[in-house]
């Protein structure tokens, strides 16, 4: 089925993908493409509307990106945001001025004129500004639709031309009615019908994967994490048995994880999933190693060796699937195609193996969208809502040397903590929650005996991107139950402490 499309022209702003995800959330398909498209190319693409993003330039700079005037004469509705708004005004004969100081942050937006763009938006609301230049005078036929105390033209437009400009950022959450503005543009100005859904995304990706993979063989390293699980499931839907997934069982996973991966993907979905048993290999290599960075390095390198060994057994493989998501793309350098996720569990793969292409069906999506795709694909909540777990897993949650005995202790304590958090209904609010086996022993009294056993630390944080984090305010009652259960049920643990440090200064993981 042909669906309606919105074209987002990329002028280099930092929120561009966010604009794209807002449009998708409003059930309209969109593509984010370079801003140098010609009017002819745009017409051929056939959008119901065009959005010009913000960008770092000033319209008066010699090398600032521009747009052909003809683009604004196609009769297709256009919405310019920030630089995009300035560019429209400049291109059509208005003027743009540089303010003495830049304006950042929340401002009160006053709606000046009621138009279809401002439907459902109160006379006063909060908007989010981030700019230095602003539109000083409008081209003929345009009028000011909203202002702030410091910005005389916060929104302008022409109903006849169906062209609008917004100086603030409707796509960020701090703009109270930003989403409503985007909705008004899409539905009231462009005539969107809301024909884009997660099911649509899945179908489209399946087609794309089929086209790019052809008759080739595909390989995927399945970590059990949401991203690789959803990517593999999509590819499996597209190419079936020609996909082989490898799950490396390094003996460092959390309780029940290897079993869950095999159950969901091999038994449930019937995937070609190979489990590489490598516990002895990993624990052997980690023997006597206490330094966290060395642990990471050893685990990362061994992972590659085991993965490579399994891949060799398959003969020629043409494509590699990666669960790269949009935040990974930003981290590893924007815009580069086929960037390999320098993720600790897959880092370095391309150096040792050759593939015709890397298939990354989730590259444009944010984490919560990946979860929606997972649900759409029928993956269970346990997989879709799994909290992030570092590649080296329990190895960096044991302070000092990793042994089988210590793994058993931290694994049990961690399972109890997870179970109680889930039972308390807190799992989706807390970004990560896990147990750490400290390298301290303390005196305790259990039954009539004096004990000298391990201290378990509980770590639970709230975060949006793991760059910063705050310790989660877990109710005392829940902490009490976790503590009682760990000291009662886990052998060799006689004390439980709760980590109340934010990041920074601490990190989320203890090692
Ligand atoms: P930190 O501890 O640096 O963690 O605050 C930030 C996020 O990164 C995860 N993390 C890792 N992920 N391999 C990974 O795949 C690693 O070696 C690693 N170390 C930390 C951590 O769980 C948190 O989500």
Image (tube, rainbow, N blue to C red):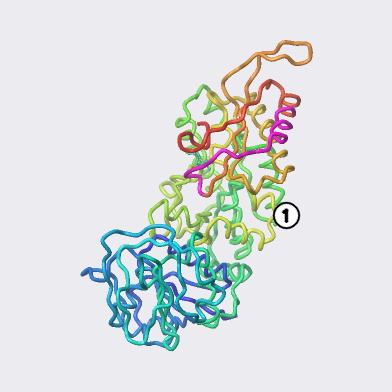
- How many numbered dots are placed on residues in this image? 1
Horizontal arrangement in the rendering, residue 158 relative to residue 473 (left or right): left
User: Percent x, y for residue 74?
Assistant: 39, 87
Residue 334 location (% of width, % of height): 39, 57
Residue sitting nearer the eye, 358 or 78: 78
Q: For this rendering, which residue is in front, 58 or 411? A: 58
Quick one: label 1, few (<14), some, or many (20+) residues within 10 Å?
few
Q: Vertical placement of 239 versus 413: above or below? A: below
Q: Is residue 31 positioned above or below 356 on the image?
A: below
Up-down: is 254 above or below 132? above
- Tell whether 94 sits left or right of 507: left
Q: Which residue does the image show at 49% across and 62% down from the upper left?
A: 364
- Check if residue 142 falls in the magenta segment: no
Q: Is residue 421 left or right of residue 112?
A: right
Q: Which residues are magenta?
A: 465-484
Residue 417: image x %, image y %? Answer: 68, 35
Residue that appears at 72% across and 48% down: 263
Q: Looking at the image, which residue sits at the far left?
A: 62
Q: Nearer the viewer, residue 336 or 85?
A: 85
Q: Position of residue 241 (x, y in %)?
A: 63, 60
Which residue is under mark 1? 268
Q: Quadrant of the N terminus?
A: bottom right
């Amino acid at each position: 089925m042909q669906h309606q499309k919105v074209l987002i022209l990329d002028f280099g702003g930092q929120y561009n993908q966010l604009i794209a995800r807002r449009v998708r959330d409003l059930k309209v398909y969109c593509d984010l493409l370079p801003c140098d498209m010609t009017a002819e190319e745009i017409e051929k693409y056939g959008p119901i509307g065009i959005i010009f993003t913000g960008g770092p330039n000033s319209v008066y700079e010699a090398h600032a990106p521009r747009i052909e005037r003809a683009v604004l004469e196609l009769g297709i509705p256009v919405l310019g945001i920030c630089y995009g708004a300035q560019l429209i005004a400049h291109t059509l004969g208005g003027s743009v001025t540089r303010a003495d100081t830049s304006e950042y942050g929340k401002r009160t937006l006053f709606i000046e004129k009621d138009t279809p763009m401002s439907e459902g938006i109160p006379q006063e609301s909060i908007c989010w500004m981030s700019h230095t230049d602003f539109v000083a005078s409008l081209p003929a036929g345009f009028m000011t639709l909203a202002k702030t105390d410091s910005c005389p033209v916060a929104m302008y437009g022409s109903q006849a031309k169906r062209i609008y400009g917004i100086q603030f950022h409707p796509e960020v959450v701090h703009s109270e009615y930003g989403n409503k503005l985007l909705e008004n543009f899409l539905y009231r100005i462009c005539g969107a019908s809301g024909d884009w859904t997660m099911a649509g995304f899945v179908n489209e990706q399946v087609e794309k994967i089929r086209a790019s993979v052809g008759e080739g063989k595909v390989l995927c390293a399945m970590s059990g994490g949401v991203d690789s699980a959803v990517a593999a499931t999509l590819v499996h839907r597209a190419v079936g048995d020609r996909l082989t997934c490898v799950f490396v069982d390094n003996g460092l996973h959390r309780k029940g994880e290897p079993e869950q991966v095999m159950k969901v993907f091999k038994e449930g979905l019937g995937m070609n999933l190979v489990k590489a048993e490598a516990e002895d290999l990993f624990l052997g290599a980690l023997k006597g190693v206490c330094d966290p960075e060395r642990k990471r390095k050893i685990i990362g390198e061994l992972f590659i060796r085991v993965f490579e060994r399994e891949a060799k057994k398959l003969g020629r493989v043409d494509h590699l699937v990666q669960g790269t998501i949009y935040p990974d793309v930003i981290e590893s350098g924007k815009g580069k195609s086929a960037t390999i996720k320098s993720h600790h569990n897959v880092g370095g793969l391309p150096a040792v193996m050759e593939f015709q292409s890397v298939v990354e069906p989730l590259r444009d999506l944010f984490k919560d969208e990946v979860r929606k795709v997972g649900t759409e694909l029928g993956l269970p909540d346990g997989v879709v809502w799994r909290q992030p777990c570092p590649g080296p897993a329990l190895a960096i949650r044991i302070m000092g040397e990793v042994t089988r005995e210590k793994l058993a202790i931290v694994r049990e304590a961690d399972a109890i903590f997870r179970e109680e958090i889930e039972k308390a209904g807190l799992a989706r609010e807390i970004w990560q929650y896990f147990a750490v086996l400290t390298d301290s022993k303390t005196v305790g009294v259990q039954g009539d005996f004096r004990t000298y056993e391990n201290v378990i630390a509980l770590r639970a944080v709230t975060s949006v991107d793991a760059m910063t984090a705050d310790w989660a305010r877990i109710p005392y009652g829940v902490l009490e139950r976790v503590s009682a259960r760990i000291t009662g049920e886990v052998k060799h643990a006689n004390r439980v402490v709760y980590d109340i440090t934010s990041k920074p200064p601490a990190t989320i993981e203890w090692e």
